[in-house]
Image (cartoon, grey):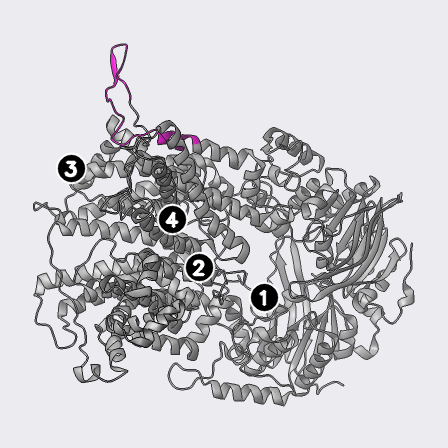
C-alpha cells in the first residue's frame, strides 16, 4: 500500500519530455489534424443528404468545405475582422475558465456569467438614456458588465468556500437561473420604454456601441495593403480588451504573488494551506475574477456586435470557452491561440455554409473531436509505450473530484 | 493458555522476500502459525510487517519464497483468492462503507441470496446475530456502520471474516484506534476465536499487548525475523531490545550544544481533532535556543495534532504557546512563519511540495511573499532564480537545473528542497516531522548535519519522529509522548534506547518517577 | 364568491392560501397532466445519473446522451419508414415497426455514447467533467449538423407513439380518478418510466447488484478487498444507464412529438442532474424531485392559460414568470449548499478508481 520511496534519477524522464513546449504543440496539432480528417470523413459520408441531389460519398466535398472555412476565416480583410470579432469573447471567457483551471476550479458557469455581463452593460446603457456620450458610457458599461459577471462567479465561489458545494454543479444550476434572470431583465427593467415587445434599447442607436474598427486605405510603395473601409462586418474595439486581457492575466498568474498563490492552491491546496495561503479566500477571489472575465465577454459582445437584447438572448460561449481553455492548456498564450482558431472556425463556418452548403455545426463537431483526441492523448499513445495512467490533457491543475475524499 | 497444536501448521511462509526499488521490505522471512494460536508479529513502523501480510492477502507478490496452507503450497492471486482460501484481514484503516448497514457491510462480496437477484436480508441478519452471539458480543445488523463506535466497527470487520468462515485472521494494529477498555474486549474476543480453532495473526508494536494476548511472538526488524519468543519466556525489556535493535548506528557527531535562553514555551496545550476528541489533553514543554528536543512516541499518540497546533493549522482548545517571550497561541500559519517558525512536514508530497511546480518555486513556497522574492504584489523572478541556484548549490540538491518539475527528483532531493527552503533563513523555532522518512543513508546524514548546524546557529529545534534511532541520534533532550501527554523527559546523550522504547510502548505509568531532566 | 371566502380575503395570507387551494383544485386536471408528462424525460435523465453516480462516475453528459438518442431514434425510424413503409399502427400505443426500430436504435446509440464516457472516465481516467463536456458539445454539434442536412430534405418522421387512454369510467371515479388519469395517460415510455423507477429503487436497495453498486460508489477500495471488480461494475452501470437517458430522448422525438429539432433537449439533462441531487441519488427521490420541478412548470403553464384572480392574482403578478422556471435550479442550490436538508453525494463520486497494483 505504501508506495516505495521515489527513486527516480535526476535525469529527464519521458514525462517531462512530454510536457515540453514542443510536445504540447505537437499534441495539439495532431489532435486538430485528426479532427479535421475525421470531420472530412463525416462530410463525405453524409454528402448525399445535401440539397440539389448532391452526389453521395463526395470525396471532394471536404476539401471544398475546409477551403471555404479557411477563406472565410482568413481569406479576406472582412474574414479576418470577423475572426477577430468571434475570437474576442472566446479569449475573454476562455481566460475566465482557464484561470479557474489554474486554481483547481472547474467553471462551467461561463454561460450565466456572460449573460450577467450583458445585462450589466445593458443596464448602464438603459440608465444613461437615448442620447448619451459613448466615451463615458461604454467604459462604464464594460466595467459594470464585468462586475455583474464577477458577482455571478462570486456566488459559486462563496458557496464552495462556505459549504463545500462543488462549483461544477452550482455553476450549471446558476447558468439556468441567470438565463431566466436575463429573460426577466429583458422583459422588465431593461425593456425599451413604451415598447410593445420585450426588447431592450439598441446600444448603437443610443450612442453606446463599441465603435467599429475602420482601417483607411494604405498604399505603401505602390502596394495596396488595406482596402477595406471597415475591418470585417463586426470588428469592434472590444477586440482590444481581449488583446489587453491576455497579457494581464498572464502577468497576474506568473508575475504576481497572487498568481503564485492561485497556481499553488490549484496544484496542491493542502501544501498551499500549509504554506500559509488562505485557500478559501483564493477560491472566492478566483471565481469572481473568472466570472468577471466571462462577464466582459458578454459586455463586449453586447456593445460591439449585438447591441440589443431580445428574448432568447443566449450564448454557447460557456462551453466553447471550456474547449478554448483546454486546448490552450489554461495558459493565456495558448488561450489566445485557441480563441483565434475557434473564432476563425466560427467565422469561416458562415462562408462554408453558403458556398458548398456544409452546415456550420461542423465546427461544433470538430471542437468535440479535437478535445477527444487531446484527452485520449493519441500522439503519446503512438510514440511511446509509457505506462499510461491518467490523461495528459488536464485542466492544468488538480480539479477536486466531485465528492469529498474517500473516508478511511 | 495455548490452544491445541496440530502437527501441521495452518499457515507457513517460507523464505518470503519482497524487494521494492531501493528497499528490501522482506528479507527471507519464515513464519509459521498453528491452529488455535494467536501469533503476534512485533516490529517497528516500516519493519516489514504490513508488506508480509499484504503478500499473504494477495495484495503484493513476493519475489521469492512460498506460502503453505495446511501443508500445501498455494499461490494467492488476489484478495478474493485469499478469502476463498479462508484468509481474512482486518485492515488498520477499516474497509467498511460508512453509509451501509452492518449486515450490508458484512455480506458485501459474499451475499446470501434469496430468489433471483435479491438479497436474503433476513437470513443474513440471522447468521450475523448468531455469529455475534457465538463469540459473545452484540451488534444490531441494521445499524449504520458510520454511526458505530470504532470498537464496534472493528467487530464488524471481524464479523466479515467470520461470515466468510475465515480460518486465518490477520489483524493489522487492531488496538491502534481503540480505548483501553475496547482493547480488553477485543482481546477476549480474539481468545474466543482462537479457542474455536482459528489462527490469529496479530500485528503490533506494543509490547505489553503482545505479551498479554499472544501465544507466540515473532519479532521483525528491517525486513528480517530477529527472534521467536513465547510470552512466558521473555520480558518487555528483551522484546524492546529485539524490536529496536542494539547495534551501533552510523551516528552524526552532534557535538556539544551551546544552549541559550528559553525560546519555545508550551504550557498545558490542549488540542482536539475534527470529531471533537481531545487528542492532546495537555502538553507542556520548553525548548531553549540552540537545543534539539526530540519527541519519541508511537505514531498516533497526538504528535500530528501537537505539530498542527504549533504551526498554526489547528486552533488549540486551551493552553499557551509563546516564542521568545511573545505569545503566539492561535496565530495563523503565515504569522507563525513571520514570527520565525520553520516547518518540515511529515508527508512531503501532500503538505510540503507542489510536485508539478519547478524546483525554484518550491524553494520559496513558504517565503514567496517576502523580500527579495516579491516586492509588494509583484514577484521577482530573477531573485527567485538567483536564490534557487544558491540553495541548490549550498544544499547539494541534485538537479539538472532548478526549473525542472519537482516531481522528477528523487525522494532525498525532494526532501532537500524542503530543508533548503526552511533552513535558508534565520529561525527561532524549527519543527521537524519525520524529516528523513524513506530516505537513503546519504541524505539522512546530510539532513542530520544541517539540523545540527541550525541548532548551533541558535535555533530551537523540535524533532518529532516515530523512528527512535533518529531521535536518539541527534536530540539533546528526549521527551516521550504517550496518549497525548509527555510522560518522560530524558537526556539525549545518556538515555537508554530500550528504556525509551519501553516508555513509548507503555507510557511508563508504572514508574512515573523515571522523569529525569538534563 | 360567497360570504365566508370574502371575509377570508380580508386576512391576506389566509385568503391567498385559500385562493391558491381553490385555484389548484380548479386547474388540477391540466396541471397534473402536464406535470407527469414534463417529469418523464427529467426522471429518465436523473435515473441515468443515479446509476452512474451511485457506482462512482459523475455524468454531466446526460444532455448529450439524450440528444443523440433523440436524433438517432427519430432518424432510424424515419429511414425505416422510408424503406419499408410506415405500416398500420398496432393497438399497442400505436406502435409501428419503424418506431420500434427507432427505439432500438436510440437505445443502442445512448449506450454507445455512455460507453465512450465509461472508457474515457474509467479506463483513461480523464477528468469526468471534461468527458461529459465532450459528449455534450459533440452531441449538439453532430445532431445539429445532421439535422441541418436532413431538414433541407424535408424528411418526414415515422410518427409518434400514442398515449394510453384511461377509460372514462376510471377518470370519473371520485377523488382518485384525476390522479389515475394523470399518471396513466402516458405513452409507452412514460408508463415504462414509472415502472423503471420502482424497479431501480427495489434493485438498488434490495439486490446484490445494488449493494455492490452502492459500495463501489462509496468506498471502492473496500469493495475491491472483498473481491468485487469495481472497474467492471462501473462500466456495466455507466453503459446500462445510457439506455435510460436514451429513452428520455425517445420520449422527446417519438412520443411527445414526432419530430426532431436541433437542441431539443433544452437543458432537460441538466434538470435531470438537479433532480438526482435533490432526490438524494435515489430513483424514487429523483422521480419525486422531477415531479416537483415539473409541477412548478405545470403550475406556471397553467398560470398563462387561466390566470388566477383576486389577491392571489395580484400576488402572482408580482412574481416574474421566469422565477417559476428558475425555481428548480434555486431549490437545487439551496439543497446543495445545505441550507435545507443537505444532499450528500456518494463518497467516491467522480474519483477515478485506481487498482492497487499487485506488483
Which callout, 1 or 4, points at the residue further toward the start of the chain? 4
Q: Nearer the viewer's eye, disc 3 or disc 2? A: 2
Q: Residue at x 15, y 39 (%)?
A: A356
In the rendering, at what x and y percent does residue B285 appear? 83, 55
- Name the residue tied to disc 2: C333
Q: Nearer the viewer's eye, disc 1 or disc 2? A: 2
Q: Residue at x 26, y 47 (%)?
A: A198
Q: Nearer the viewer's eye, disc 1 or disc 4? A: 4
Q: Which residues are magenta?
A: A215-244
Q: How crowded is the residue under tag 2: few (<14 C-alpha within 10 Å), some, or many (20+)?
A: many
Q: CA distance from mark 3 to mark 2?
A: 46 Å
- Name the residue tied to disc 4: A112
Considering the image in quadrants, where does the C terminus of chain B appear? Answer: bottom right
> What is the count of numbered marks?
4
- Judged from this view, the residue extending furthest toward the top is A221
In the rendering, at what x and y percent does residue B108 appear? 50, 77
**Badge 1 sits on which subunit?**
A
Residue A396, can we see it? no
- Name the residue tied to disc 1: A408
Q: CA distance from mark 3 to mark 1?
A: 61 Å
**Are the residues flagged by discs 3 and 2 from a single subunit?**
no
Q: Nearer the viewer, residue C232 or B117?
A: B117
Residue B226, quarter of the rendered image: bottom right
**Badge 2 sits on which subunit?**
C
Amino acid at each position: 500500500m505504501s508506495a516505495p520511496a521515489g527513486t527516480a534519477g535526476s535525469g529527464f524522464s519521458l514525462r517531462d519530455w512530454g510536457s515540453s513546449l514542443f510536445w504540447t504543440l505537437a499534441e495539439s496539432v495532431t489532435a486538430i489534424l485528426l479532427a479535421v480528417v475525421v470531420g472530412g470523413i463525416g462530410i463525405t459520408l453524409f454528402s448525399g443528404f445535401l440539397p440539389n441531389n448532391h452526389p453521395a460519398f463526395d470525396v471532394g466535398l471536404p476539401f471544398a468545405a475546409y477551403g471555404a472555412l479557411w477563406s472565410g476565416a482568413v481569406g479576406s480583410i472582412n474574414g479576418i475582422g470577423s475572426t477577430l470579432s468571434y475570437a474576442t469573447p472566446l479569449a475573454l471567457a476562455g481566460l475566465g475558465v482557464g484561470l479557474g483551471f489554474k486554481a483547481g476550479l472547474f467553471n462551467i458557469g461561463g454561460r450565466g456569467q456572460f449573460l450577467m455581463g450583458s445585462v450589466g452593460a445593458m443596464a448602464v446603457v438603459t440608465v444613461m438614456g437615448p442620447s448619451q456620450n459613448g466615451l463615458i458610457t461604454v467604459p462604464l458599461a464594460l466595467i459594470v458588465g464585468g462586475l455583474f459577471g464577477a458577482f455571478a462567479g462570486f456566488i459559486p465561489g462563496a458557496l464552495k468556500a462556505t459549504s463545500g458545494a462543488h462549483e461544477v454543479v452550482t455553476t450549471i444550476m446558476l447558468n439556468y437561473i441567470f438565463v431566466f434572470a436575463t429573460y426577466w431583465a429583458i422583459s422588465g427593467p431593461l425593456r425599451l420604454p413604451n415598447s410593445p415587445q420585450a426588447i431592450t434599447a439598441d446600444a448603437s442607436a443610443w450612442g453606446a456601441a463599441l465603435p467599429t474598427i475602420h482601417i483607411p486605405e494604405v498604399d505603401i510603395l505602390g502596394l495596396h495593403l488595406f482596402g477595406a473601409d471597415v475591418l470585417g462586418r463586426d470588428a469592434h474595439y472590444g477586440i482590444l480588451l481581449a488583446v489587453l486581457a491576455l497579457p494581464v492575466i498572464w502577468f497576474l498568474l506568473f508575475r504576481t504573488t497572487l498568481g503564485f498563490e492561485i497556481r499553488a492552491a490549484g496544484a496542491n491546496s493542502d501544501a498551499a494551506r500549509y504554506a500559509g495561503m488562505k485557500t478559501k479566500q483564493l477560491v472566492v477571489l478566483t471565481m469572481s475574477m473568472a466570472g468577471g472575465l466571462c462577464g466582459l465577454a458578454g459586455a463586449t459582445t453586447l456593445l460591439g456586435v449585438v447591441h440589443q437584447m431580445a428574448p432568447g438572448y443566449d450564448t454557447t460561449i460557456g462551453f466553447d470557452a471550456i474547449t478554448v481553455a483546454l486546448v490552450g492548456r489554461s495558459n493565456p498564450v495558448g488561450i489566445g491561440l485557441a480563441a483565434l482558431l475557434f473564432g476563425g472556425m466560427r467565422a469561416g463556418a458562415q462562408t462554408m455554409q453558403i458556398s458548398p452548403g456544409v452546415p456550420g455545426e461542423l465546427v461544433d463537431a470538430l471542437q468535440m473531436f479535437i478535445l477527444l483526441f487531446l484527452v485520449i492523448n493519441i500522439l503519446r499513445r503512438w510514440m511511446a509505450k509509457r505506462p499510461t495512467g491518467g490523461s495528459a490533457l488536464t485542466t492544468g491543475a488538480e480539479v477536486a473530484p466531485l465528492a469529498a475524499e474517500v473516508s478511511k | 493458555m495455548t490452544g491445541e497444536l496440530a502437527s501441521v501448521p495452518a499457515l507457513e511462509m517460507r523464505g518470503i522476500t519482497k524487494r521494492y526499488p531501493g528497499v528490501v521490505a522482506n528479507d527471507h522471512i519464515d513464519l509459521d502459525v498453528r491452529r488455535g494460536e494467536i501469533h503476534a508479529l512485533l516490529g517497528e513502523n516500516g519493519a516489514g510487517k504490513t508488506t508480509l501480510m499484504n503478500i499473504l492477502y494477495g495484495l503484493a507478490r513476493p519475489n521469492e519464497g512460498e506460502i503453505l496452507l495446511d501443508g500445501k503450497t498455494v499461490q494467492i492471486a488476489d484478495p478474493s483468492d485469499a478469502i476463498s482460501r479462508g484468509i481474512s484481514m482486518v485492515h488498520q484503516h477499516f474497509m467498511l462503507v460508512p453509509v451501509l448497514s452492518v449486515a450490508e457491510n458484512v455480506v458485501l462480496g459474499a451475499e446470501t441470496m434469496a430468489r433471483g437477484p435479491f438479497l436474503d436480508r433476513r437470513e443474513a441478519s440471522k447468521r450475523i446475530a448468531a455469529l455475534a452471539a457465538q463469540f459473545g458480543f452484540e451488534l444490531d445488523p441494521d445499524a449504520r456502520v458510520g454511526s458505530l463506535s470504532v470498537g464496534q466497527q472493528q467487530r464488524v470487520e471481524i464479523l466479515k471474516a467470520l461470515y466468510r468462515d475465515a480460518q486465518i485472521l490477520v489483524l493489522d494494529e487492531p488496538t491502534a484506534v481503540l480505548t483501553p477498555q475496547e482493547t480488553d474486549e477485543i482481546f477476549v474476543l480474539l481468545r474466543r476465536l482462537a479457542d474455536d480453532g482459528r489462527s490469529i495473526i496479530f500485528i503490533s508494536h506494543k509490547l505489553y499487548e503482545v505479551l498479554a494476548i499472544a501465544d507466540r511472538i515473532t519479532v521483525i526488524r528491517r525486513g528480517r525475523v530477529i527472534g521467536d519468543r513465547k510470552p512466558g519466556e521473555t520480558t518487555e525489556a528483551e522484546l524492546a531490545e529485539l524490536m529496536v535493535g542494539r547495534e551501533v548506528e552510523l551516528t552524526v557527531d552532534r557535538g556539544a550544544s551551546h544552549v541559550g535562553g528559553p525560546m519555545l514555551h508550551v504550557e498545558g496545550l490542549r488540542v482536539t481533532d475534527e470529531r471533537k476528541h481531545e487528542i492532546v489533553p495537555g502538553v507542556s514543554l520548553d525548548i531553549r535556543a540552540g537545543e534539539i528536543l526530540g519527541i519519541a512516541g508511537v505514531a498516533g499518540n497526538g504528535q500530528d495534532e501537537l505539530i498542527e497546533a504549533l504551526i498554526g493549522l489547528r486552533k488549540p482548545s486551551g493552553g499557551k504557546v509563546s516564542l521568545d517571550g511573545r505569545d503566539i497561541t492561535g496565530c495563523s500559519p503565515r504569522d507563525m512563519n513571520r514570527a520565525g517558525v520553520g516547518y518540515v512536514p511529515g508527508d512531503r508530497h501532500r503538505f510540503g511540495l507542489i510536485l508539478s511546480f519547478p524546483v525554484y518555486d518550491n524553494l520559496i513556497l513558504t517565503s514567496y511573499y517576502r523580500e527579495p522574492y516579491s516586492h509588494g504584489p509583484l514577484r521577482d523572478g530573477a531573485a527567485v532564480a538567483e536564490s534557487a541556484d544558491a540553495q541548490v548549490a549550498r544544499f547539494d540538491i541534485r538537479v539538472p537545473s532548478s526549473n525542472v518539475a519537482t516531481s522528477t527528483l528523487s525522494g532525498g532531493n525532494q526532501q532537500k528542497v524542503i530543508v533548503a527552503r526552511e533552513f535558508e533563513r534565520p529561525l527561532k523555532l524549527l519543527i521537524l516531522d519525520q524529516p528523513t522518512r524513506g530516505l537513503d543513508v546519504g541524505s539522512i546524514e546530510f539532513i542530520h548535519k544541517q539540523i545540527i548546524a541550525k541548532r548551533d546557529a541558535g535555533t530551537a529545534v523540535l524533532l518529532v519522529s516515530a523512528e527512535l534511532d533518529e531521535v536518539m541520534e541527534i536530540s539533546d533532550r528526549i521527551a516521550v509522548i504517550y496518549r497525548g501527554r509527555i510522560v518522560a523527559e530524558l537526556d539525549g546523550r545518556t538515555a537508554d534506547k530500550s528504556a525509551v522504547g519501553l516508555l513509548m510502548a507503555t507510557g511508563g505509568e508504572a514508574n512515573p518517577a523515571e522523569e529525569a531532566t538534563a | 364568491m360567497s360570504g365566508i371566502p370574502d371575509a377570508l380575503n380580508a386576512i391576506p395570507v389566509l385568503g391567498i392560501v385559500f385562493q391558491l387551494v381553490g385555484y389548484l383544485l380548479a386547474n388540477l386536471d391540466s396541471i397534473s397532466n402536464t406535470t407527469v408528462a414534463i417529469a418523464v424525460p427529467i426522471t429518465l435523465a436523473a435515473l441515468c445519473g443515479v446509476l452512474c453516480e451511485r457506482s462512482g462516475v459523475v455524468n454531466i453528459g446526460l444532455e448529450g446522451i439524450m440528444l443523440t438518442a433523440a436524433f438517432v431514434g427519430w432518424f432510424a425510424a424515419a429511414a425505416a419508414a422510408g424503406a419499408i413503409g410506415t405500416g398500420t399502427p398496432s393497438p399497442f400505443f400505436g406502435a409501428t415497426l419503424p418506431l420500434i426500430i427507432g427505439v432500438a436504435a436510440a437505445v443502442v446509440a445512448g449506450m454507445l455514447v455512455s460507453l465512450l464516457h465509461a472508457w474515457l472516465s474509467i479506463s483513461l481516467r480523464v477528468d469526468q467533467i471534461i468527458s461529459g463536456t465532450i459528449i455534450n458539445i459533440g452531441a449538439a454539434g453532430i445532431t445539429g449538423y445532421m439535422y441541418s442536412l436532413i431538414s433541407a430534405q424535408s424528411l418526414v418522421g415515422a410518427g409518434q407513439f400514442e398515449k394510453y387512454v384511461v377509460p372514462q369510467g376510471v377518470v370519473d371515479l371520485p377523488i382518485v380518478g384525476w390522479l389515475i388519469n394523470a399518471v396513466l395517460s402516458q405513452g409507452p415510455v412514460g408508463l415504462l418510466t414509472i415502472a423503471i423507477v420502482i424497479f431501480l429503487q427495489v434493485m438498488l436497495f434490495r439486490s446484490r447488484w445494488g449493494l455492490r453498486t452502492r459500495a463501489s460508489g462509496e468506498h471502492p477500495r473496500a469493495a475491491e478487498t472483498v473481491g468485487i471488480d469495481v472497474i467492471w461494475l462501473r462500466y456495466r452501470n455507466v453503459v446500462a444507464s445510457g439506455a435510460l437517458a436514451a429513452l428520455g430522448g425517445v420520449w422527446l422525438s417519438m412520443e411527445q412529438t414526432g419530430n426532431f429539432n436541433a437542441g431539443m433537449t433544452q437543458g432537460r439533462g441538466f434538470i435531470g442532474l438537479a433532480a438526482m441531487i435533490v432526490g438524494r441519488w435515489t430513483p424514487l427521490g429523483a422521480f419525486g424531485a422531477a415531479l416537483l420541478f415539473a409541477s412548478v412548470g405545470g403550475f406556471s403553464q397553467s398560470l398563462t392559460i387561466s390566470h388566477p384572480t383576486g389577491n392571489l392574482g395580484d400576488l402572482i403578478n408580482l412574481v416574474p414568470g421566469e422565477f417559476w422556471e428558475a425555481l428548480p435550479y434555486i431549490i437545487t442550490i439551496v439543497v446543495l449548499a445545505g441550507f435545507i436538508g443537505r444532499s450528500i453525494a456518494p463518497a467516491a463520486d467522480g474519483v477515478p478508481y485506481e487498482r492497487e497494483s499487485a506488483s
